[in-house]
Amino acid sequence: MSELGVNVLEPLAVVTRRQGLQPMAARLDALREWLARDLVDLEADLAGVNGQDDLAGRAAAWLLERPGKRVRPLCVLLAARLGPKPAPTARDLAVACELAHAATLLHDDVIDQGEERRGAPTARIVYGNSASVLAGDHLLVLALRRVEQAGQPALLASLLAVIGEMVAGEALQLERRGRFEPDPAAYDRIVASKTASLFAWAMRAGTTASGCTVPEVAAGVRFGLALGQAFQLTDDALDLAGDPARTGKDSLLDVREGKLTWPLLVACQRAPELLGRLQAVALDPDGEDRTDLRRCLLATGCVDETLARARSAATAANAALAGFAGSPARSALSAVVQAVVQREA
Amino acid sequence: MSELGVNVLEPLAVVTRRQGLQPMAARLDALREWLARDLVDLEADLAGVNGQDDLAGRAAAWLLERPGKRVRPLCVLLAARLGPKPAPTARDLAVACELAHAATLLHDDVIDQGEERRGAPTARIVYGNSASVLAGDHLLVLALRRVEQAGQPALLASLLAVIGEMVAGEALQLERRGRFEPDPAAYDRIVASKTASLFAWAMRAGTTASGCTVPEVAAGVRFGLALGQAFQLTDDALDLAGDPARTGKDSLLDVREGKLTWPLLVACQRAPELLGRLQAVALDPDGEDRTDLRRCLLATGCVDETLARARSAATAANAALAGFAGSPARSALSAVVQAVVQREA
């Protein structure tokens, strides 16, 4: 079974069984069966993508070989089953989407001085910042070439626009690093451009490739934007409340990297005295009692508030699915929404 | 007059007058007149390209506002006059070519820890490495979007392939940094992929846009590859023999950045004891008497050898021009070749 199955579908199946949702669990098993070939092909493709045996290639492989959740390519593959016609380019588009994501991670880790990802040191720690910059460039080019070769010029144009948005979002986040002012509009702008835009492209790619109508593509894009928001809010909550052994990263990593997340924003609104302590940790990660800080943050109820907001984004994502006729792919996308907000890693 | 006129055509006019080549000087003046509108539009376009008022945008503007020689876009514009039909997309392709070049400079300066460029501190010194990485991403996306909007999908595909080559070339250079082994094959591979490939694309873009035949496009590509090699060899020579006040960078910068250039390669072949001294400077720029090192390098005759190799690449470039019927654009490209190898900055 591919890692994607392990990472997204398996935990969801466990959750649904635990909650007594047997039909849902059965549906997920069926979904895994149904997608098995696509998922195996996807992993094989990602493993073989990197023909380059140089520093850039090795740094890229370091990240790609540590499988993430693969939610974005899963969205491409499922969206590619929403339309009336077969989508022979679906796998290429799914691979491209994951490569574009990996490219931005390699650059973001340099920019944010990230030290851990997917339970391991980041590529920049292992191979150096220079190799990580080049590895990001390498994967970005591979992603764009893959879409170009799929022969749907409009999708290449929209992916370029999305990558432009992601860069602008990262720039905005960089400018605000370590400040933690509780500015909800800035937070929403960063999430929309850095995270949700690529989920939206995943849905645009899959629906377009399978011949969906214009309103259906638009519904897919709305779904992707809402799912991306739900995904990021859940990520934000896990940074504070997650189990580091499961998430693969230390807790309060976002604080140390100076990132304003939704729970930190809520905590600073509810207990303004925390702002100075957050800024102090961003300046000097060892200068604060982080266990106590975490306790004080959690005491504001900010995680519950964040998970509630994630659920409301999930509801919006499911509402967007009403734009499609009932189908196994539509049910599967709804299962992905649930997996995204209920995940523990 | 645009900076391009100042930077490429003006020095060439001076050189040719000095050498008593009055007809050539007159031809260059005519060329400047002929291209004036295109050149002004190009600069205006590059100045306005950067709508983004964030760290990435400002770091990008820092580089773009310090005009380089603009040789690549000049090649696009001239090649766009080689073919039988008007090329309304020529300026977009020229802008894209310069933006792609600038994008790689912003990343290369982070990777090579470059401190000076175009007579000023690099963007990464002024705005930081993170901003410089993002600025490169930003300009790369702008370049690709510009080509995409020009509506010639094959040119977008070839630009993506070229950027992939440039990344591989930079990776190879990074792996060999500071070692200075005199490996001519590795040197040629780095120059072909890092420098010549984009010159070749410039010619491909212009010839394709103006409706040249397939053999003409191929001749244009050969011209670009040879011109790129001549350009890099001249650059290499200037690092050792140029006047820092004119080149805008300290001499021996390539040594300090650990780059194997052609004159260093020749010097190490002729005087193997220099290898250790070069490696020492790359490790500790202040640990060696650089004035003496420079004298010893020059004493090997490596600069003359490099300039001779540049002239032979220039001859190959001119030979490739035989693939086109006589025209003012063909003469102008021949003048560009001469400017590239005779420049002092």
Image (spheres, coloured by chain):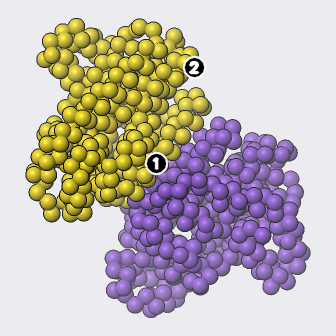
Chain colours: A purple, B yellow
Residue B237: image quadrant is top left
Q: Position of residue B257 (x, y in %)?
A: 27, 54
> Which sits in the foreground, A23 or A315?
A23
Same chain? Circles 2 and 1 = yes
> Which sits in the foreground, B52 or A253?
A253
The kind of residue on which mark 2 rests is Val
Q: Chain of mark 2?
A: B
Q: Position of residue B175 (x, y in %)?
A: 40, 57
Q: Is residue B119 visible?
A: no
Image quadrant holding the C terminus of chain A, namely bottom right
Label of residue B56 in the image: none
In this rendering, position of residue A331 left or right of residue B276: right
The kind of residue on which mark 1 rests is Val
Residue at left offset 46%, top offset 13%: B324
> Which sits in the foreground, A59 or A197?
A59
Residue B14: image quadrant is top left
Along the polypeptide, which appears first: circle 2 or circle 1?
1
Instruction: Decide: is B221 above or below B138.
Output: above
Do the residues bearing badges 2 and 1 touch, measured as CB atoms within 8 Å? no
In this rendering, position of residue B108 left or right of residue A91: left
Report the residue marked by disc 2.
B214
Residue at left offset 41%, top offset 8%: B326
- Of helix, strand and loop, which one carries label 1? helix
Instruction: Decide: is B181 above or below B209.
Output: below
> Which sits in the foreground, B137 or A269?
B137
Residue at left offset 47%, top offset 26%: B221
Q: Position of residue A162 (x, y in %)?
A: 56, 49
Label of residue B167 in the image: 1
